[in-house]
Image (cartoon, grey):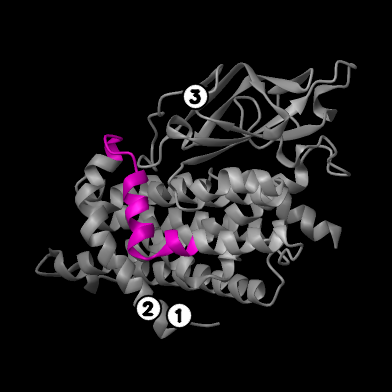
Amino acid sequence: MFEWSDEDLMVRDAVRGFIDKEVRPNLDALESGELPPYDILRSMLAAFGMDTMNAERLEADLAAEEAGEQKKGGGSNALADSMFLILNMEMAGVSLGLIASMGVSMGLTVSTIRSRGTLAQKRRWLPGLVTMEKVGAWAITEPDSGSDALGGMKTTVKRDGDDYILTGNKTFITNGPYADTIVVFAKLDEGDGTPMRERKVLTFVLDAGMEGLTLGKPFKKMGMMSSPTGELFFDNVRITKDRLLGETEDTGSDRRGGDSAKAGFTAERIGIAALSLGIINECQRLSIDYAKSRTLWGQEIGRFQLIQLKLAEMEVARLNVQNMLFVAMEAAKAGKPPTLAQASAMKLYSSRAATEVAMEAVQLFGGNGYMAEYRVEQLARDAKSLMIYAGSNEIQVTHVAKGLLAD
């Protein structure tokens, strides 16, 4: 794949039409936190028939599983779905937080339940999540365990008869303040003195309103402000066994839940490349328009070589990130999706490129670029979050290097 197809471009234009009509008029309310993103996301899914399509696809997959004919891979491949990627890209260039909220709800939360849950658990929680009737959250990060999410985890569960008692808290949880359905990772305290870092990690599904579960208020953030992020507090939450994903403590060789988490990290980091491309595209578009319209010393600033250099470097970044995404898409279609190391490399490069392009766009706009009324100011704040989100870029270096040294 070396370019978007005509069908892809038609989808892109349709998405842009929806954004112009439904998103841009509400940007101020979204960015201030006055308007949560979920109704707009539901409207978007309905406008493109994705809610119905997702529901029908889920039911077909669950019916096949019930009949003992589970499809290999357990569902759709989002990376091979160009419509999904285009939607992510275009939305990221206008309101990155919207797409982040949707990605966690319909991506991480759904995929974890789908890969680890029993058939009954999938039927219980997935129908509401795949249409965004219900808002999902994926809770693994804690105050003292960001990049060391599994090893440094302190949230615990203890057996209490046939139930479990959950204690602890999570932070930086996307959708946390408004979540209906929450996937929570916690360490099993078996009372045998096993060191915390070595304890087994179990995964549970909680619903808002459970006794002892508190959803914190949205944080005030530098960027991605249209995506509510907050804390979750677990004060002796009683959890019945039907909320333990898979309804078994047997995690096989994956004692710490690393395989499940890594699968989520891989998908999330590949998604960062699409989000980065959306920001790069929008920064470049705005910069080109500004370079053509802004005059200085009697001529358009686009005639100055230093401005041309900025635009040229934006194009290099755009091509590089787009080509990385195309290669990953083709590999996924061929049944060879990127490894965690490759996904980390994509995330490392693309997030850095998006941040550099956005900051150069601010510089190109000069004083106007520093003003909130000009879009590049928001894009610069949003882009920076991509260097931290889904694992800081520093930890990506470690994963890329481990992948190289393992060969």
Amino acid tagged 1: Trp
* The one of 145 and 154 positioned closer to us in this rendering: 154
Amino acid on which disc 3 is placed = Gly
Q: Residue 392: which quarter of the image?
A: top right
For the residues carrying marks 1 and 3, which lies nearer the camera in this image? Answer: 3
Q: Which mark is residue 209?
A: 3
The residue drawn where x is 65% and y is 55% is 266
- In the rendered view, would you say 377 is above or below 171? below
Residue, disc 2? 9
Image coordinates for residue 165, horizontal then vertical, percent? 70, 18
Taking the image as drawn, is residue 93 in sight? no
Residue 351: say if magenta: no
Residue 316: where, in percent of width, then height?
A: 46, 71
Q: Which quadrant does the N terminus fall into?
A: bottom right
Q: Residues within 10 Å of mark 3 (few under 14, many from 20)?
A: few
Query: Is 91 situated left or right of 157 in this image?
Result: left
Q: Is residue 353 above or below residue 261?
A: below
Measure how far apart labels 1 and 3 are at the Cα level.
45 Å
Q: Which residue is mark 1?
A: 4
Which residue is the extreme one toward the left?
Answer: 298
Magenta span covers which residues? 31-54
Evaluate if marks 1 and 2 touch, with contact meaning CB atoms under 8 Å apart.
yes
What is the C-alpha distance between the residues marked 2 and 3? 43 Å
Q: Tell me which numbered mark, 1 or 3, is placed earlier along the sequence.
A: 1
For marks 2 and 3, give the one nearer the viewer. 3
Residue 5 visible in the picture: yes
